[in-house]
Image (tube, helix red, strand yellow):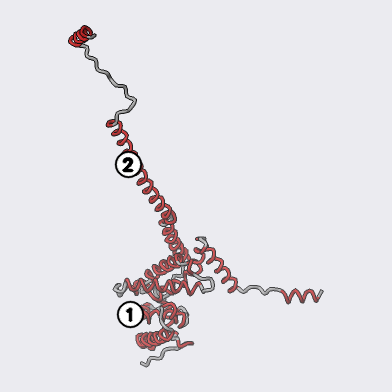
Amino acid sequence: MDAALSLHTALRVPEPSTEWSARTRERDLIVAAQHGDRDAFAELVTLHQRRAYAVARAITATHEDAEDAVQEGFLHAYRALDRFRPEQAFGAWLHRIVANAALDIGRRRRVRDADALSDSVALPFRDPAEQDELRRRLTAGLEELSQRQRSVIVLHDVEGFTHGEIGNMLGIPEGTARSDLHHARAALRRTLGDLWSQR
Amino acid sequence: MSIEPRIGPHGRDDDLTRALRSVYAAPSDDAYWTSLAGRIMARIGGEAAEQWWLPLARFARIGLVAAAVALVAARIALSRDAARQTAIAYDGVIETPASAPLQVATDATPGSVRDATLRYVISP
């Protein structure tokens, strides 16, 4: 009896981890979507839209542009789904598409009003005076950065992507992403530094 | 005053990161994400609805070509038939049928009767 129990224990398949299960589920959804199941694609949208928005928001100047980029990105992804290979990471593939859509929108709207950034976001700080000053300084600092530097610092410091992932998304070498991050941090510290040191 | 940023792990400036997060914060309301997903799927559905006829377009093209070929063929056939009808009619006009009866002309005038009588008298 004990031998049977130990054999059963030895042969028992380990419980699939949540991550493994989620990946399997995602792969099933992708295959179903590739076969024309639109509900499966809708579920993929629900799973990935927040991260896709974060990527788009890091690249575009406004929330509205980020939203457009997310919609464009998912539309492109849906059209290109047949070309997606299951061994790829769907998230990385999608982020690349969304990043390209965001870069396209950025190119089309390069001459957008400089105040759009500050109009489109809400800063949840306690002290209104500090909030206004911080907003003003941060907005000014972000506008002094190149679009690529801004995207790199947000994707890395806010969203937690690695240099390699950022390079892949933006179509730049990893070293360039690293260098952009260094310069962007230094520029924003210069802009905000004295404000913070007064606290 | 000196600038002394608080640097976190991986070289992050914690204050800077916090400030950036506040600027780039994604909407936290679930209703927003439900709505966005709905709009994305509506766009995908709309595009699919606009292009539902695309698979049929190939067949439509083939059908149009077939109809054009049929039209040309019908026109050629009609034109040949018309030419044949014209030829038959022409032949009917210019050709005298061999079996057509000959009409013998008879002169029924009084002068002819007299000539006949005279030929009878003088005949041997």
Query: Residue furthest toward the bottom?
Result: B2
- The residues bearing labels 1 and 2 have C-alpha atoms spaced at a distance of 77 Å
| Mark carried by residue A101 | none
Q: Report the residue at 58% width, 70% height from top.
A: A24
| Residue drawn at 39 percent across, 72 percent down | A102
The residue that disc 1 covers is A143
**Is residue B102 in view from this perspective?**
yes
For the question of whether residue B53 can be seen, the reply is no
Q: Is residue A148 above or below residue B104?
A: below
- Element at label 2: helix
In-front residue for pair B59/A185: B59
Callout 1: residue from which chain?
A: A
Residue reaching furthest to the right: A1
The residue that disc 2 covers is B79
In the rendering, at what x and y percent does residue B7 appear?
45, 88
Q: Residue at x 40, y 69 (%)?
A: A69
Tell me where residue A98 sits by quadrant.
bottom left
- Amino acid carrying label 2: it is Ser
Three-letter amino acid code at the position of disc 1? Glu
Position in image of residue A179 (x %, y %): 40, 87
Residue extending furthest front?
B124
Quarter of the picture containing the N terminus of chain A is: bottom right
